[in-house]
Image (cartoon, coloured by chain):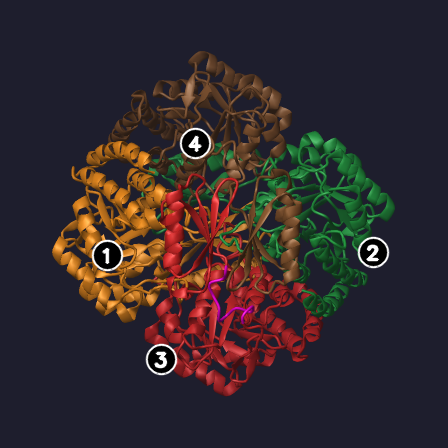
Chain colours: A orange, B red, C green, D brown
Amino acid sequence: MIVNMAANATEEQIQHVVDRIKECGFLPHLIQGAERTVIGVVGKNRGRRAEVEALRVAPGVDEILIISQPYTLVSLELQPQRTVVDVKGVKIGGPDLVVMAGPCSVESREQLMETARGVKAAGAHLLRGGAYKPRTSPYDFQGLGVEGLKILAEARKETGLPIVTEVMGVEDLDAVVEYADLMQVGARNMQNYPLLRRLATVPRPVLLKRGPSSTIKEWLLAAEYLLSGGNPNVILCERGIKTFDSELRNTLDLAGVALAKELCHLPVVVDPSHATGRRSLVPAAARAAVAIGADGIIVEVQPVSGESAVGWTAISRLAWLRRDDEWTSTGDRNGRCCAVRQRGCFKSRFSHER
Amino acid sequence: MIVNMAANATEEQIQHVVDRIKECGFLPHLIQGAERTVIGVVGKNRGRRAEVEALRVAPGVDEILIISQPYTLVSLELQPQRTVVDVKGVKIGGPDLVVMAGPCSVESREQLMETARGVKAAGAHLLRGGAYKPRTSPYDFQGLGVEGLKILAEARKETGLPIVTEVMGVEDLDAVVEYADLMQVGARNMQNYPLLRRLATVPRPVLLKRGPSSTIKEWLLAAEYLLSGGNPNVILCERGIKTFDSELRNTLDLAGVALAKELCHLPVVVDPSHATGRRSLVPAAARAAVAIGADGIIVEVQPVSGESAVGWTAISRLAWLRRDDEWTSTGDRNGRCCAVRQRGCFKSRFSHER
Amino acid sequence: MIVNMAANATEEQIQHVVDRIKECGFLPHLIQGAERTVIGVVGKNRGRRAEVEALRVAPGVDEILIISQPYTLVSLELQPQRTVVDVKGVKIGGPDLVVMAGPCSVESREQLMETARGVKAAGAHLLRGGAYKPRTSPYDFQGLGVEGLKILAEARKETGLPIVTEVMGVEDLDAVVEYADLMQVGARNMQNYPLLRRLATVPRPVLLKRGPSSTIKEWLLAAEYLLSGGNPNVILCERGIKTFDSELRNTLDLAGVALAKELCHLPVVVDPSHATGRRSLVPAAARAAVAIGADGIIVEVQPVSGESAVGWTAISRLAWLRRDDEWTSTGDRNGRCCAVRQRGCFKSRFSHER
Amino acid sequence: MIVNMAANATEEQIQHVVDRIKECGFLPHLIQGAERTVIGVVGKNRGRRAEVEALRVAPGVDEILIISQPYTLVSLELQPQRTVVDVKGVKIGGPDLVVMAGPCSVESREQLMETARGVKAAGAHLLRGGAYKPRTSPYDFQGLGVEGLKILAEARKETGLPIVTEVMGVEDLDAVVEYADLMQVGARNMQNYPLLRRLATVPRPVLLKRGPSSTIKEWLLAAEYLLSGGNPNVILCERGIKTFDSELRNTLDLAGVALAKELCHLPVVVDPSHATGRRSLVPAAARAAVAIGADGIIVEVQPVSGESAVGWTAISRLAWLRRDDEWTSTGDRNGRCCAVRQRGCFKSRFSHER
């Protein structure tokens, strides 16, 4: 930490800060600048660090700058080996790109089974689908609950695809653990610490969505809750952040994905569906996610049903996933690039469809 | 709702949308524009409204504009009578300004009792203090839990001040209900729907902090969860939003407070401490909150302790609250203004102290 | 400046940075931390400061933290005397609140003269009105140009109110200088440096609107352009920033006003009309601006014209300004507070009008 | 446009709006909803459209929704043929990816010539470099001006690379037109309308950077200024937007690039250097930009100089560009993908270098 004293701080104020730093078990280093005094705080004493930070309200203190990162267990600096999370045999964070696909929410047995077969045929590796749905309005459909989980389990049985589904609260946790292979924490729950603390103790990997207004640091600290609580199997998921631009549902922060991968050893996947909210941009956004280093994508798909409006959409999405099949089948980074080329072909096909 | 068809939408696509709207129980009104067709959707059929909204992915649809507000129970349009919440005899939302004061977190019996006496003497109406603390880092102090609640209860017994304290999750809810007079939902939990649903059923009023990236509409919808679940005693609390400007901890959205009061009948209070994170700005920000129509303020205070750095701060804060005492004692809108004048005096006093 | 070396920086990398700091005329202070080395950079050598900052891309460097504020001439720390700007006899930044009122743009002689008389009668101190209008779309009305300036001059002649009007570019500067008493720099031009450099040399005070995405620091640095170029008569104007919340036109950053006043000695005024974009919130927002310490407000008014829709609005706005008349007439800080009380009365009157 | 009347609007208020719409030359379509009346506004009458929009302040009006996009000349809907901009023989927006590289600012003849040779050898297609620099602080280096332009011209003469350089204001325009092949409008000038209007008339293509807080719509409208003024040769450039996350310099909005390409026919390039501000992320961000459909990238490069810190950086950047050489040499979309593969190889090489 660096304590930046005010230009007009008195000797007494500086001495007071120096004394407090020592009391807290750190070493103060004074730097007498031309305009002001700056005090470096050196040493490892995590427990009393907050006390030094509290000096920011002491008289004569202008601000306190935090230098070392507050997370340790997720840090790539401290653990240079990248984590590969195994979800029932599917490796996330390894050389292969992983595709998780399915509907936003489980609405009926028919809908889910049809979609599950479709994404399986299209080459996806995990089936996604929400049984418990966080909804901005209390009047919107809140999910089928346990019934939805049972439908997911049936789809897994038939297709062999592991299931990723959201757990919304501690009270549903046991039910979700029973059915899910990968526990999803929604964006609005990224800083639901009681939930994170409980998820740190369950024998399931966790997909931690980034909060819509969370910095990369806050995201990594949320993951630190899971690791420090005992669960090392954490996958980060970027799904768009909230910015001034409302022309798309969210702003997809792909450079944030690259930064997260530079700072921590956990796999990072991208959700282009929630990030853009615009069907026509999903394939390109997924492509870019792969190019910037994402370990996987999680994408919304809807069943092909002849007369329904959304079925039309689903066809193109499944077609796209079919391309992803070829793309992910080669099994190494070069393979991914070939796939990008394949999607080049796909792209033209997709274009005339629109 | 308004369905805005694409400029190149075909007759079939338009007819499809029209048919779907009818199937969902609404009346479609076609407007044939110079460049495109727009379809008004008329009628009340809340249940199938989501199905019409889902048409936004139908072929030929450009976007769907939601016209009527999705909240009803909190709406001032539908209930023109303003809600006054009674917290153990303290009326929030009525003619008097209400001041809630206390430390960020309960750290010890001594700290809290001293602060409680101070804020009582200074004229505050409620005692705030966190027993359960949401922390960005798992390594920070997480609160004293039930022990902290008991200390709060002791302070209430001595001072007579009702207690507002945060409930972080469903699992702590019973403990907090036992001790708290006003249940605080933290900013990071504003969209924790399982928690909101449970709080809708407890016999306690709720202080609902605005999420750091929540729009006014999302905030009102979170309150709608509480009202629709059976708890009409909800107080909104603005505590700053996340924006590009990081020079202060958050951006205090006072116009948002005015807008919330224009749209809904619930009382709105302001937390200038979390909103600015800068001691020197808290008094002015509180003053502005009152001027724009806030029904109360909730502010961090720290005990006066001779040798400690933060004690210095606390003195001025308590002094400020003492001014608030005069200011809130008059009991009407004119009274508030007198108080602003008093604080004018205070301000000059405060200035030379810094 | 503080150079924060990476945890794995080598001795050579550290030595290289130390050498470069010396070459640039500064003194390096090494702090050997538990995890990493931090180097304090001490000394005054403004010219080569950018070279040290460029070290942020040097190998082994993690980041460079800027400690001392980059502005000096606007700094309250360096010049503790507050600036009072005199606009043709109207003092801005002194004890009296200043009200600038008028239409968004000058549309016709009739419209402006009527408005000018209205705001004069209502007690405003300056007449605002745009002759050159920055418009997001090239198809919108771009202002009357010199003809508009002449109409403004006529209104000044009749009412005696000094004129504040926008200068959009260097090429219009001579024309605007000829007519305006206070040169307004629009939000989109806050970082138009050629314009700022030219305005630094004209014999007119400048009203510098804050850019919609400018931090307080960037705003103060834009003012520093004016002061360092020779023009000390600068008034800052907050008019709302761009955030994720689009329910109002902008987010009014009143705590930013308080911060600006804490950091610099220039007067700060607030534009509640552009900040909120919602007529019904303007009075309350103006009130809050005064409460937080703004030196004035600049507000949009439209003429009272019997049959026109906007005339209805204008009546209430003028009525409001009439209150401001009483409010500003007392001439000291206590006076302002009385005015707030007056507006308390006004408020109830205004309420039943809506 | 859609006029959304308030739920409690009176018959007279509705009639007033209807009458005004007719007066302005449009056709009103009333939709009588369950809760409120909505009025569709139909017809093409651009000139008086602003008058209808002004009804948003009329009594009884809740809001006015703009449906049709305000831009026309840049719209892909209205001109389905994509624009290819020719900069001295380099085609931007066609099948080949275009790389523009060079230093942030021209600092000396030696620096620029060395960089120019480097980027030429590395396969770049245009040389970038700033002679006029917009600087947040007046104390920072403001560029060499005309001298810098002359150095750029010399580099062009030797290497044959066309030059892209920034024009900061109308007063420098003639000088820049004389030397530049592509006129860059900086992010802070995106809404400098006098500058745009002048650039609309010069015989040079324009690179229009997106403002740090501009929506896609505002960006396209800025381009519309250029096209409507007579200059069809416009290239858009995304360079990161301002959001709450300050861990990187800006937030790179790649989905915004995809959206811009979906809405308009102009080429779009990406500046990963300014967008991320972090050397290590630039290659991956550039890769993602290509994957999402960018027509080119513009990247900062620094000269290779044995002993200097930044030289080290430059080597890797030039090496990266060398890969880009192979990548851009194939001349079709498949070619780009091969290049992505090549950069896959590069990436591992780059990794061990860091």
- Residue C113: percent from left, percent from top: 81, 46
| Image quarter of residue C72 | top right
Q: What segment carries the magenta color?
A: B68-78
Check whether the beta carbons of the residues at disc 2 and disc 3 lie within 8 A of each other: no
Tell me the residue that label 4 is attached to.
D268
Residue closest to the eye, B270 or A109: A109
C337 drawn magenta: no
In the image, residue A41 sits, relative to residue D120, either above or below, namely below
Please give the label number shown on residue A111. Answer: 1
Report helix, strand or loop for mark 4: strand
**Residue that label 3 marks:** B174
Q: Is residue A157 left or right of residue A58?
A: left
Chain of the residue where label 2 is placed in the rendered structure? C
Residue of label 2: C121
As measured in the structure, the alpha-carbon distance from the residue carrying label 2 to the one carrying label 1 is 69 Å
Mark 4, Cα crowd under 10 Å, few <14 / some 14-19 / many 20+, is many
The three-letter amino acid code for the residue at tag 2 is Ala
User: As shown in the figure, which amino acid type bears the numbered disc 4?
Assistant: Val
**As shown in the figure, which amino acid type bears the numbered disc 3?**
Asp
Quarter of the rendering occupied by the C terminus of chain A = top left
